[in-house]
Amino acid sequence: MRQFFAIAGGMLLASGLVPPLSHAQPLPTPLPVTELGPGVFAHIGDIALMNRENDGAIANLGFVIGDDAVAVIDSGGSALEGSRLLAAIRSRTDKPIRYVINTHLHPDHVFGNAAFVAEGTTFVGHKNLPRGLAARGPFYVDAFRRIMGDDAMAGVKIISPSLLVSDEMRLDLGGRTLLLKAWPAAHTDTDLTVLDERSGILFAGDLVFVRHVPVVDGSLRGFLAATDALAQMPAAKVIPGHGAVIEDWPRALEPQHRYLARLRDDIRALIARGVSIDTAAQTAGQSEKPDWELFEDYNARNATAAFAELEWE
């Protein structure tokens, strides 16, 4: 992957240079969010790479408000974005933020975690997430400090979850429950989905991409299997990890399945011909190029990962 994947107070939140944000201190400009169902909100990020211009704000984020508490689903690509998400929540409710749920380990979904530490929040993730963050976290921070600059990275800390999901888990927000499901290796080996059972709205994380080319950082075969399994899950609306909110479910999964299957079939054919991994990276999946954004940034990496996975099947 070419790139793995009043404001000053929020930026310095986790640096120790200023006190943590509290309700008595001014919050930054709230992140724009849309209410998709009663008490269910989402912010739709840009389809782009994390960079200096967007401060890493490219992922879809959300929160759910129950009778007693709030849960956040992914916190954003910087401490600033996380604090803007916090401001959006506080503009709608003063209920405690009980959980921050990270759908996987990539920086655009976890770099905002530090903004919620002062809220007394419990961080939740896949059982593999602590190991993944320990292995990759320092690299992510160093890499994106070079990419985005010190200002955008101010306050970013790698915060590992303390509540881990190994299969399924329900979280009670008071009058509504969230069903969390941990998936086998697919987009990554830390993928988690979150279903609000009251509204039927599913936060799919990066197990679902719309317009943004899917990214394979776990298992191509697992990603295809997860796509098939997701298609069997009833949902009123689906918030993908990247791209527009889905109402045409599960038909909206068809482009993703087609891309992943094309990549699989091309790689298998190239392996059978004895083609090198470098050649495969430049040729597999090319027929899909017109249908996806950021194709040039991710497809060769996807093909390389797929080749390594499928070479010995």
Image (cartoon, helix red, strand yellow):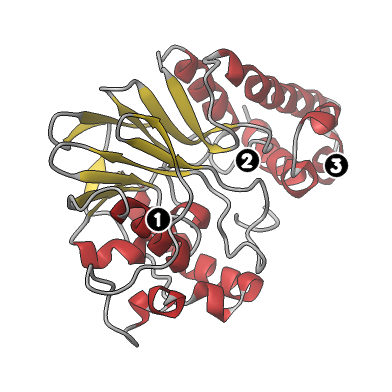
Q: Residue at x 23, y 67 (%)?
A: 23
Q: Earlier in the sequence, mark 3 or mark 2?
A: 2
Which is more foreground, mark 3 or mark 2? 2
Q: Marks 3 and 2, how far apart in space?
A: 16 Å
Q: Residue at x 55, y 15 (%)?
A: 248
Between 9 and 272, the one lying in front of the other is 9
Q: Count the marks.
A: 3
- Vertical relation: 292 (above or below) 28: above
* Amino acid bearing label 2: Val
Between 231 and 115, the one lying in front of the other is 115
Which is more foreground, mark 1 or mark 2? 1
Q: Earlier in the sequence, mark 1 or mark 2?
A: 1
Q: Is residue 146 visible?
A: yes
Q: Percent position (x, y) of residue 95?
A: 18, 50
Provide the residue designation for mark 3.
Answer: 282
- Vertical relation: 80 (above or below) 179: below
* Amino acid bearing label 3: Gln
Left or right, 32 with respect to 196, comes to right
Which is more foreground, mark 3 or mark 1? 1
Provide the residue designation for mark 2.
Answer: 215
Left or right, 35 with respect to 227, comes to left
Q: Percent position (x, y) of residue 208?
A: 54, 31
Q: Percent position (x, y) of residue 122?
A: 21, 54
* Amino acid bearing label 1: Leu
